[in-house]
Image: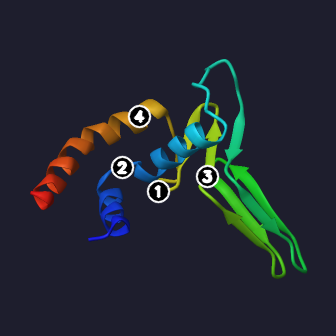
Amino acid sequence: MNRDALESQIAQKLPYYALIERIRIHDFHRFGLVPPDPNFKQNLFLGPTKLTAQKGAAAVNLTAQGPEVSTTGSSQVKFQRPLLVQNGDFFDDDSAKYVKLEDVLKTFLTKARDVIAEFEKLVA
């Protein structure tokens, strides 16, 4: 089994796997994320996003349901590890809702033990 196949299997079993990867990439490799402050209201949309307008328009709107893309003509919008943060909550693509970091970590760590044990059996 190659790394991509293994990661795909793990991602299916661990809630918020893709979201945690995006948070980690942005926190470590890009700008650094500040812990949420309940008194500070903000919307952040992080990650390289390429808007290419060809005989039309390309736009991204940030909504309560996550990013919405609209294009006309041959225009395109390409995301690379997008991360949407609204008032300290992170948008999870899989559930299509905003979640608190504490909830992401609690859910992930609760499931991680079982997933690790399952994959340890494969290696043994």
| Amino acid under disc 1 | Asp
Name the one closer to the observer, 55 or 6: 6
SS for callout 2: loop
Q: Are marks 1 and 2 in contact (CB under 8 Å)?
A: yes
Name the residue carrying label 2.
15
State which quadrant residue 77 falls in.
bottom right
Name the residue carrying label 1.
94
Q: Is residue 5 left or right of 26 when viewed as pictured?
A: left
Q: Is residue 117 left or right of 45 when viewed as pictured?
A: left
- Residue 45 lies, with reference to residue 103, above or below; the image says below
Name the residue carrying label 4.
103
The answer for how far apart the CA atoms under marks 3 and 2 are is: 19 Å
Q: Is residue 1 left or right of 42 when viewed as pictured?
A: left
1 or 2: tag closer to the N-terminus: 2
Q: Residue at x 75, y 55 (%)?
A: 61
Name the one closer to the observer, 68 or 8: 8
The answer for how far apart the CA atoms under marks 1 and 2 are is: 9 Å
